[in-house]
Image: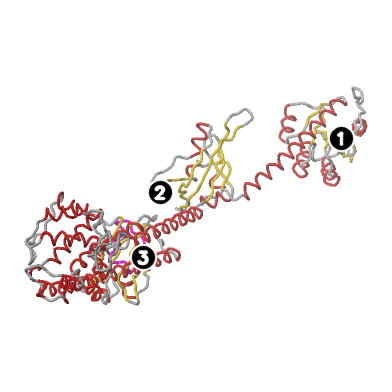
């Protein structure tokens, strides 16, 4: 046999390809070896039979095998090549003079890296070897990449499922097996919707398989917070993303679905949102505690604030009614639907530990029902509670100095809704409610006491005024009428109710100092001489000395002392001027003059209201405070003020 073509003697790399030559004809083998050497390849060994070729390949670990198909012995070249390729993963190139269809078909099965028909030239040999080595290198890299990719898919924390264009599963990593409950072998070939079944968060609506849209439209599909129902009925919240697998021509050849279990993350987010909501509700509740002035308003504001918290379906407050010997709800917010009347019970039922409310009130500690459906403590209310979606309950006692005043009751739409953090927050809320309730009741008691004190003070003031007027029958009722007019003037001047009350009291007492003036002088029908008038003028100072001994919340004694002072300093007893007088004294001065002029006196007939108003109008700004005068004129002329009793 001879060889055609010229030798190509290009220099080769420092580490030439090592070739095992398997040829049963020695002359041909030597010729092949020479050609290989001339092309720069290294001959690591030769073999003449199939068994020998397998042994030398295993011993020498060649980079490539040139294999004659027809070999002597029990194992021919095709069988030897298959064994070497499967064991060593070494590329094999067939050399043969036979090209019959049967031989070629056998050779194809072994997936050779090349096929050369004898005779061949060196260029063909060189090209075939280089192509074979390149393909082998690329295949090796591809397999390494595939192994790396497969290892990555198996080791990542996300679940991965791949499908073909029909939506049938072709791959599934271990995390996907764990989350779905399907193993790879049983899932392979199944439709994705059989293995990956998702619903909305409530589990009511079946969500369309995301891969279906990917295969139809070639788009990436993302889903968030879907409910994955596993093979055994397990339920997980997952986020998923599906994308198309595209070949080099841009054709969709399948889809890949990546999803992860976000159940714990979602629980943490819900928990955080719930605690933030609870914190906000308690803050709003505390703001309400500062504003409200009645128990019903307080309780309603608290219930409405707490009912805004996620999954707090119903919030109520129950109070101990000692007069009726029962515990009853007094306020609520949320989904009630006739449930709370079931929670009324008596002292006798309380002693039996009636449900969470009864337990909380009787023990003075929180009572938690984590699962309404199974807790024996809730048997009596279970059907009605479950009908309204109440899956867990907590009752917290409202305790003040060891006394249980009632309970704060919360009904949730989820099981195990009341963990340590929720209980701590709600106990704080219950404590705040107790403080606010006690404060309101104390404020009510103080208000009642204040009313009683004010009533007693009023009666005392009226008694003192009456006592002084008994000595002066001609001016009977004068102090009451002055008090009424002075109060009306103060109200027209938009003074506070507290100031108005003080002015009323001052009006009642302003002439109490006349108690030292002899009755004969007070009721004298004729003109009063200078000595008598000087004695009468002492009544404001005497009144001051009497009243300064009493503690009033208003400047009573000072106003009584100053009520005959005038802006220009012409008054008595101190000759005080504008800027030195209290507003109470200035109001009293105007009211006293108007009432005195309008009333009958022992020494003259009544001058009338018109004359009195003319007097203060003319002396406005010189003797009397202009603001006070304007207010007095307005209530008479525009608002129709009357003394009611005769003057």
Label 2 residue SS:
loop
Which residue was labeled with disc 1? 23
Which residue was labeled with disc 3? 394
Between residues 460 and 483, which one lies in front from this camera angle? 483
Mark 1–mark 2 CB contact (< 8 Å): no
Q: Marks 2 and 3, how far apart in space?
A: 27 Å
Magenta stretch bounds: 371-395
Between residues 355 and 316, which one lies in front from this camera angle? 316
Which residue was labeled with disc 2? 203
In the displayed orientation, state which residue is furthest to the front: 530
Among numbered discs 2 and 3, the one appearing first in the sequence: 2
- 22 relative position to 551: left or right: right
**Residue 380 part of the magenta-drawn span:** yes
In front: label 2 or label 3: 3
Residue 122: mark: none
Among numbered discs 3 and 1, the one appearing first in the sequence: 1
Label 1 residue SS:
loop
**Does residue 38 lie above or below 284 as drawn?**
above
Q: Marks 3 and 1, how far apart in space?
A: 90 Å
- 197 relative position to 54: left or right: left
Q: Residue at x 50, y 48 (%)?
A: 238
Q: Residue 400 appears in which quarter of the rendering?
A: bottom left
Residue 331 placement (x, y as % from top left): 27, 61
Q: Residues within 10 Å of mark 1 (few under 14, many from 20)?
A: many
Residue 228 placement (x, y as % from top left): 47, 48
- 344 relative position to 373: left or right: left
Q: Residue at x 85, y 28 (%)?
A: 125
């Amino acid at each position: 046999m001879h060889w055609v073509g010229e030798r190509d003697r290009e220099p080769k790399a420092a580490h030439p390809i090592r070739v095992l030559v398997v040829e049963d004809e020695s002359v041909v083998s030597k010729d092949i070896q020479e050609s290989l050497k001339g092309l720069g390849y290294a001959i690591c060994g030769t073999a003449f039979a199939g068994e020998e070729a397998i042994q030398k390949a295993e011993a020498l670990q060649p980079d490539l095998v040139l294999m004659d198909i027809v070999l002597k012995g029990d194992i021919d070249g095709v069988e030897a090549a298959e064994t070497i390729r499967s064991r060593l993963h070494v590329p094999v190139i067939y050399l043969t003079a036979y090209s019959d269809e049967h031989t070629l078909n056998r050779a194809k099965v072994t997936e050779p890296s090349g096929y050369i028909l004898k005779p061949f030239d060196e260029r063909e040999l060189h090209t075939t070897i280089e192509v074979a080595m390149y393909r082998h290198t690329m295949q090796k890299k591809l397999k390494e990449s595939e192994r790396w990719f497969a290892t990555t898919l198996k080791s990542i924390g996300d679940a991965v499922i791949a499908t073909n264009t029909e939506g049938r599963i072709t791959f599934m990593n271990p995390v996907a097996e764990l989350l779905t409950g399907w193993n790879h072998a049983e899932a392979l070939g199944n439709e994705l919707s059989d293995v990956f079944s998702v619903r909305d968060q409530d589990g009511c609506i079946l969500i369309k398989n995301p891969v279906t849209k990917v295969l139809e439209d070639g788009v990436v599909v993302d889903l968030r917070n879907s409910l994955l129902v596993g093979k055994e009925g397990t339920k997980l919240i997952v986020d998923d993303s599906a994308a198309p697998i595209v070949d080099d021509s841009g054709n969709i050849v399948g889809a890949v679905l990546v999803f992860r279990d976000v159940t714990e993350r979602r629980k943490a987010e819900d928990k955080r949102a719930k605690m933030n909501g609870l914190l906000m509700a308690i803050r709003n509740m505390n703001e309400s505690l500062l504003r409200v002035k009645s128990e019903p308003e307080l309780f309603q504001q608290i219930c409405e604030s707490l009912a805004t918290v996620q999954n707090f379906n119903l919030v109520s407050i129950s109070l101990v009614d000692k007069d009726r010997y029962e515990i009853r709800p007094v306020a609520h917010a949320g989904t009630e639907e006739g449930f709370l009347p079931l929670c009324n019970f008596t002292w006798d039922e309380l002693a039996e530990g009636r449900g969470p409310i009864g337990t909380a009130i009787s023990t003075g500690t929180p009572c938690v029902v984590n699962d309404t459906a199974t807790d024996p403590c809730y048997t009596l209310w279970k059907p009605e509670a479950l009908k309204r979606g109440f899956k867990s309950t907590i009752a917290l006692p409202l305790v003040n100095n060891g006394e249980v005043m009632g309970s704060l009751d919360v009904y949730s739409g989820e099981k195990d809704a009341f963990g340590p953090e929720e209980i701590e927050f709600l106990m704080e809320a219950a404590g705040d409610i107790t403080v606010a309730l006690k404060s309101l009741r104390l404020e009510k008691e103080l208000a009642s006491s204040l009313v009683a004190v004010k009533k007693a003070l009023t009666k005392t003031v009226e008694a003192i005024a009456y006592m002084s007027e008994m000595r002066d029958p001609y001016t009977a009722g004068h102090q009451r009428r002055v008090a009424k007019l002075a109060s009306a003037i103060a109200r027209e001047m938009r003074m506070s109710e507290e100031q108005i009350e003080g002015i009323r009291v001052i009006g009642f007492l302003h002439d109490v100092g006349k108690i030292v003036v002899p009755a004969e002088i007070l009721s004298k029908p004729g003109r009063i001489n200078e000595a008598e008038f000087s004695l009468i003028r002492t009544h404001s100072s005497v009144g001051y000395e009497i009243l300064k001994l009493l503690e009033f919340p208003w400047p009573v004694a000072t106003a009584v002392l100053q009520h005959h002072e005038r802006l220009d300093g012409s008054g008595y007893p101190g000759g005080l001027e504008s800027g030195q007088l209290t507003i109470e004294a200035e109001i009293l001065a105007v009211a006293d003059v108007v009432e005195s002029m309008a009333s009958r006196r022992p020494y003259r007939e009544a001058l009338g209201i018109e004359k009195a108003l003319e007097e203060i109008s003319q002396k406005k700004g010189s003797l009397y405070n202009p603001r006070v005068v304007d207010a007095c004129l307005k209530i008479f002329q525009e608002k129709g003020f009357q003394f009611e009793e005769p003057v």
